[in-house]
Structure formats: structure tokens, C-alpha cells
Image: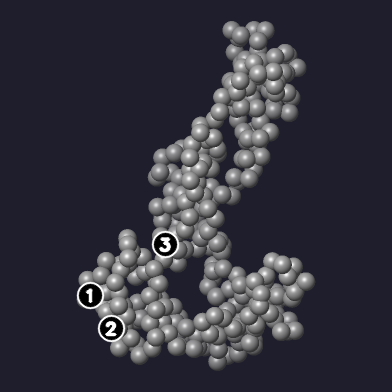
């Protein structure tokens, strides 16, 4: 087991593990940590705990020190300078007539460089832009192209459910989602109803997918032959969430289907009335990634 502390650098960013160096930190504490791009100031999201060493990427970077008033002030000043940097960069983008959309700006904690995040349809030759920005800010400039999901996460907003974007509130990583999930959950395949503001499939399709996969495995399909307490029959309708089935009984095929719960029926495996494959299984399950 290894002792770690989890640190987040943005409100809804990914949590990274660091070696606390035999010090104890509480959730909400600010610390200065060692990263691949130099020292950074972040907030403790996970207090000291032990985790399996096999789950860690060794060696762990260390917590340099608890953040003091000077460190916190510097981080706040860097945040305050972002708006002017955004304005300046946008002016230079317009001047160079580049087909790119500026999304966010991030100052390195030690003010050694500035990162500009942008989106674009394809590759952008921004070499002249970098030289121009370097002459203005007098520090190292880095431009990083991001995807539309990362843009939504940074900018925030309201989803079609009326609540703030999940990615901007609590999601630390984007999980792969596919059209197969929407089909298995019985949702409309209208793109406007299953896509988020970013234009990709909604992240929330992933939330209940494990439950739907379990229900699909344990519930007889439409067209399946089953045995009930009233005799054999064929499933006509299925409600996955409630577990209710409508079964047309063999003994009275002209009567309306009878309702049974899935726990009260037993699928028959004699090959009669072979179940139909649901559309979800026939569809492509190509995943959308960030």
C-alpha cells in the first residue's frame, strides 16, 4: 500500500495523486506540488489515504509544501490576468485571419509560460501567432488544440435537462458512449434529443448503461417463448425498467395479452418461437471518444 493525496487544479478537473511526504492534508487545503511542467498550486480533493501500489503510475510526484498566502495570491493574480490575455490573443488571431476559436487561457504557476486552448476544424498553422504572442507577453507561449467536449467542460452551460453540464460540474474524465446505449435504453434516436450542447452523444447515457445491460440479460425478449403459471405463451411487449411483460398465451391466442412480471415467467429453450434480436444488437456499436 502507498500513501497518497489527491489534488485537483481546476474546479472540475481530473484528480491527480501525489506523495504527501509524510504530511497530513485535509480536503480543501491548498498545496504546491511538483508536476511535469513545473510547480503548480492545487486544491486537495482527496485527503491522505492508502491505495494499492499496482494502481499507481510510479514514481509519484511529491507535494512540495502547503500553499501559503503568497502562493494563493499568485494563483489568484494569474487567474485575474486571464481576461486580458484572452483579449490580446483574440486580437492577434483576427489579425492573422486564422480559422480557430479561442476557448481558455492558463498561466503557469511560476509565470514561465501561458497556455492558450483553442478548437478548430482541422490543423492550424499558428507559428506566426506564437511568435507574435511571445513578443507581447515576453514568456513561453503554448497553443493546445482541444476537442468539443473539452470546450464544453471549460465554458460550462445548461444541458437539455435544465441542469449545468455534468462535465463542468463533477466529471473528471470523459467515458466512451455509443449509439448502442441509446437504443438499448429505448431512447429516441433523434440526434437533437440524445446529443449534448457539444454536439456529441450525452455523457449521461453511460450512467445507467450497466443496469440496462443487466436487465437485458435477465428479461425475456419480445418474441421469446415463455412458460407462465397460466401456461405457455409468447412475449408481445417488454418493459425493462418495471420488469412487466405482456404475454399472448397459447391456450387463448385471440385474447388480449396477459401481464406477468419477469420473475414469474421462465424462458423456454426448445427452439419454438425463436426470439427476435433487438435492434440494439444489430446496430453498430462504434464508440464516440473525446
Q: CA distance from mark 2 to mark 1?
A: 10 Å
Judging by the rendered image, the residue that carries numbered circle 2 is 132
Q: Residue at x 51, y 38 (%)?
A: 183
Marks 2 and 1: CB-CB under 8 Å? yes
Q: Secondary structure at mark 1?
A: helix
Q: Which residue is mark 3?
A: 147
Per the model, the C-alpha gap separating discs 2 and 3 is: 25 Å
In percent of width and height, residue 201 lies at: 46, 49
How many numbered marks appear? 3
Q: Is residue 163 left or right of residue 60?
A: left
Q: Is residue 210 above or below residue 56?
A: above
Q: State how the image is colored.
A: one colour
Q: Who comes first in sequence, dot 2 or dot 3?
A: 2
Which mark is on residue 96?
Answer: 1
Q: Residue 164, position in %: x, y?
A: 49, 58
Say which residue appears at 72% left-offset and 13% top-offset: 231
185, above or below 61, in the image:
above
- The residue shown at (57%, 68%) is 14
Q: Is residue 27 visible?
A: no
Along the line of sight, the residue nearer the viewer: 265 or 244: 265
Where is residue 40 shown, x and y percent of the image? Answer: 55, 83
Closest to the observer, 133 or 253? 133
SS under mark 2 = helix
Closer to the chain start, of discs 2 and 1, is 1
Looking at the image, tell me whether mark 3 or mark 1 is earlier in sequence order. Answer: 1
Amino acid at each position: 500500500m502507498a500513501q497518497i493525496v489527491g489534488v485537483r487544479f481546476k474546479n472540475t478537473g481530473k484528480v491527480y495523486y501525489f506523495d504527501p511526504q509524510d504530511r497530513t492534508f485535509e480536503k480543501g487545503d491548498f498545496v504546491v506540488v511538483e508536476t511535469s511542467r513545473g510547480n503548480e498550486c492545487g486544491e486537495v480533493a482527496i485527503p491522505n489515504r492508502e491505495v494499492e501500489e499496482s494502481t499507481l503510475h510510479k514514481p509519484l510526484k511529491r507535494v512540495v509544501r502547503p500553499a501559503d498566502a503568497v502562493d494563493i495570491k499568485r494563483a489568484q493574480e494569474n487567474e485575474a490576468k486571464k481576461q486580458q490575455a484572452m483579449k490580446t490573443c483574440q486580437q492577434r488571431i483576427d489579425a492573422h485571419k486564422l480559422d480557430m476559436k479561442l476557448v481558455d487561457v492558463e498561466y503557469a504557476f511560476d509565470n514561465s509560460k501561458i497556455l492558450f486552448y483553442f478548437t478548430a476544424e482541422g490543423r492550424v498553422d499558428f507559428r506566426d501567432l506564437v511568435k507574435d504572442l511571445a513578443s507581447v507577453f515576453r514568456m513561453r507561449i503554448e497553443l493546445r488544440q482541444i476537442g468539443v467536449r473539452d470546450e464544453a467542460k471549460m465554458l460550462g452551460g445548461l444541458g437539455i435537462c435544465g441542469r449545468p453540464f455534468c462535465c463542468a460540474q463533477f466529471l473528471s474524465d470523459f467515458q466512451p458512449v455509443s449509439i448502442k446505449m441509446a437504443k438499448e435504453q429505448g431512447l429516441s434516436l433523434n440526434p437533437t434529443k440524445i446529443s449534448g450542447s457539444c454536439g456529441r452523444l450525452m455523457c449521461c447515457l453511460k450512467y445507467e448503461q450497466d443496469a440496462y445491460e443487466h436487465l437485458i440479460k435477465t428479461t425475456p425478449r419480445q418474441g421469446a417463448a415463455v412458460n407462465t403459471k397460466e401456461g405457455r405463451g409468447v412475449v408481445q411487449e417488454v418493459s425493462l425498467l418495471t420488469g412487466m411483460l405482456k404475454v399472448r398465451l397459447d391456450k387463448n391466442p385471440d385474447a388480449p395479452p396477459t401481464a406477468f412480471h419477469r420473475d414469474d415467467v421462465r424462458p423456454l429453450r426448445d427452439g419454438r418461437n425463436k426470439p427476435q434480436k433487438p435492434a440494439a444488437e444489430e446496430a453498430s456499436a462504434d464508440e464516440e471518444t473525446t
